[in-house]
Amino acid sequence: MARKSVAAVDEDSLPPDMSRRERNKARTRTAILEASISCMAESGVQAATMDQIAAAADVARATLFNYFPSKNDIIDALVAENDAGFFVAIEGWRRATHLTTVEKIAGLFAATDHYLRRAPARRRVVLSMSWRNWGLPGNQQRIQRVVDAFTALLDDGRHGGDLSPHLDSAVAGEIIAQTYMGVIHAWRMDEAHPAANRLDVVARLLATMIAPGTPFPERAPLPPRPENYT
């Protein structure tokens, strides 16, 4: 049995005018999702039961079903939060206007490595859920959003002058996105996969592609601000 969840909502992330009731609901929802990850990491996604999750979250079974009518609803919520974390992260890097595009990519890839290294069993279970329907036609929109996010990052560089105006941002964005997702997928599939070294090498190769001759930072910059992805 997984330990009871001790998850807490980041109070600063909640709207200041949120009522006490709504804050309590947010805390309960977070506890359920955190407990779900723990149970699924321990027992497996398929084997984990709603009763296990309710016990781990320290909520009544009826309360759990009130928030999430089925385990699939929990999985959908975890996948949505994982996706949202990535977009929060990349938007943070885009706002770091003091950094070059190469530095932003170096930082993003290094932050991803940091994310994967923290509680790897938990990260793998979330990523496994995220990838379970990745290849289905209905998920093409999810993939395209990742591609669009990298394309926008490159467009920022072109408009800012640190990337060539002749760079095809759409093509380069797709290459970067697919490579980025590929390394993460390989890490998810194989516990022995050297994701840390691979992410650094890949970032350097991609930097050479988008900005030939631009020095790669000896030390990747830190995330521009605290956010969920790291």
Image (spheres, helix red, strand yellow):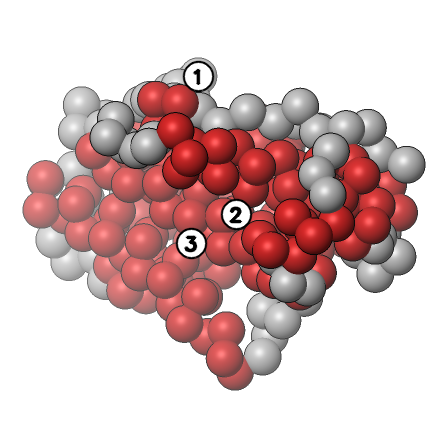
> Could you say which is closer to the camera, residue 170 or residue 118?
118
Quadrant into which the N terminus falls = top right
Q: Where is residue 160 in the image (x, y as percent from the top left)?
A: 10, 39
Q: In this view, does 197 lie to the left or right of 99?
A: right
Q: Is residue 88 left or right of residue 177?
A: left
* Numbered mark located on residue 219 in the image: 1
Q: Where is residue 156 in the image (x, y as percent from the top left)?
A: 17, 45
Q: Give the distance between the C-alpha atoms of the residues marked 2 and 3, in whole angstroms.
A: 19 Å
Q: Where is residue 138 in the image (x, y as percent from the top left)?
A: 50, 80
Q: Is mark 2 on a helix, strand or loop?
A: helix
Q: Is mark 3 on a helix, strand or loop?
A: helix
> Could you say which is closer to the camera, residue 61 or residue 107?
61
- Upstream in the sequence, badge 2 or badge 1? 2
* Numbered mark located on residue 82 in the image: 2
Q: Is residue 51 visible?
A: yes
* Numbered mark located on residue 43 in the image: none
The kind of residue tagged 2 is: Asn
Instruction: Name the image quarter holding residue 107.
Output: top left
- Upstream in the sequence, badge 1 or badge 3? 3
Q: Is residue 227 visible?
A: no
Vertical comparison of 188 with 20: above or below: below
Q: Where is residue 104 in the image (x, y as percent from the top left)?
A: 32, 33
